[in-house]
Amino acid sequence: MENKCILKKLLDENNFGILALIDPDHKNDDKLSKIINLVNNNNFLALLVGGSSIKDNFFEKRLSFLKNNTEKPIILFPGSSNQISPSADAILFTSLLSGRNPKYLISEQLKGVESIRKFNLDVIPTGYLLIGSNDITKVETISQTTPLDPTDFNNILNHALVAQYFGMRYIYLENGSGAKDSISPKLISYLKKYINISIIVGGGITNKNEIQNLRKAGASFVVIGSLLEKNNYESVFSLFN
């Protein structure tokens, strides 16, 4: 596969897409085969692979397994500079713009650029915004940042505009792994009035109705992770049918 503009190519061909998020941590070792089968047997456009933290040295082994068992593009969504691999096709090069922790604003990015260049990965510049929910999510705990208030649309817009003015191609709105609620479609509609970069939405999405509402509001991609980890074929299948 040619490593250029993977997300743009997918968006041009499909106008909208569902991405699978796979956490390559040891907790998923016993179900990784089932997860990739779920992905292959449903109309996910690509795989996002990455986690907030990986507690062993088998990231590359797991990523190689995924690469050898799917024909779908693999896009890194790294929680740190240690999660960069030549087994992927592309990388979401994110900066956590919603927080002020320099580790995730710039430090990890500086640590990772040499590997990205060496592996010739398709780089997808992405502004990453953590949006608040009723629960403290893993992303919030690991990043040590406070999420943006989900009701303050103007503040979220200002952060999204920072991403756009920096020249980033995408904005990723994240409710966090394990969130009980998804991002509000009203927020997406509001942002689309003022920004012209594509929106990726993740966290708390559990059914087809939520996906359709986010699509109608203007999201370009939605991300499914927790449902895959639960290995519920019927729940995943229902997202597409």
Image (cartoon, rainbow, N blue to C red):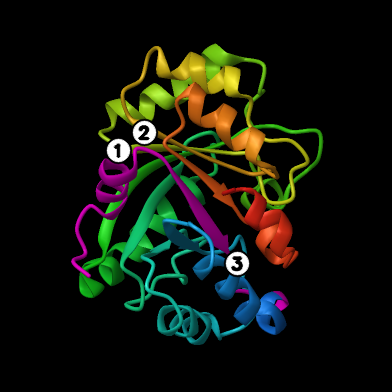
Residue closest to the eye, 235 or 188? 235
* Spot occupied by residue 110 in the image (x, y as percentages of width and height): 34, 58
Find residue 180 and report its image quarter: top right
Quadrant showing the N terminus? bottom left
Q: Which residue is mark 2?
A: 198
Q: Residue at x 59, y 23 (%)?
A: 185
Residue closest to the eye, 134 or 31? 31
Left or right of 6? Residue 133 is: right
In the orientation shown, which residue stands out farthest toward the front? 241
Q: Is residue 153 above or below residue 213?
A: above
Q: CA separation, marks 2 and 3?
A: 24 Å
Q: Secondary structure at mark 2?
A: strand
Q: Secondary structure at mark 3?
A: loop
N-term-proximal mark, 1 vs 3: 3
Q: CA separation, marks 1 and 3?
A: 24 Å
Q: Residue at x 25, y 74 (%)?
A: 119
Q: Which residue is mark 1?
A: 169
Instruction: Tell me the amino acid under the disc marked 3.
Output: Asp
Q: Residues within 10 Å of mark 3 (few under 14, many from 20)?
A: many
* Cβ–Cβ under 8 Å for marks 2 and 1: yes
Q: Is residue 86 visible?
A: yes
Residue closest to the eye, 189 or 57? 189
* Spot occupied by residue 113 in the image (x, y as percentages of width and height): 29, 62
* Start-end of magenta stretch: 1-27
Q: Is residue 226 visible?
A: no
Q: Which residue is mark 3?
A: 23
Left or right of 177? Residue 241 is: left
Q: Residues within 10 Å of mark 1 (few under 14, many from 20)?
A: some
* Spot occupied by residue 175 in the image (x, y as percentages of width and height): 65, 39
Instruction: Tell me the amino acid under the disc marked 1.
Output: Arg
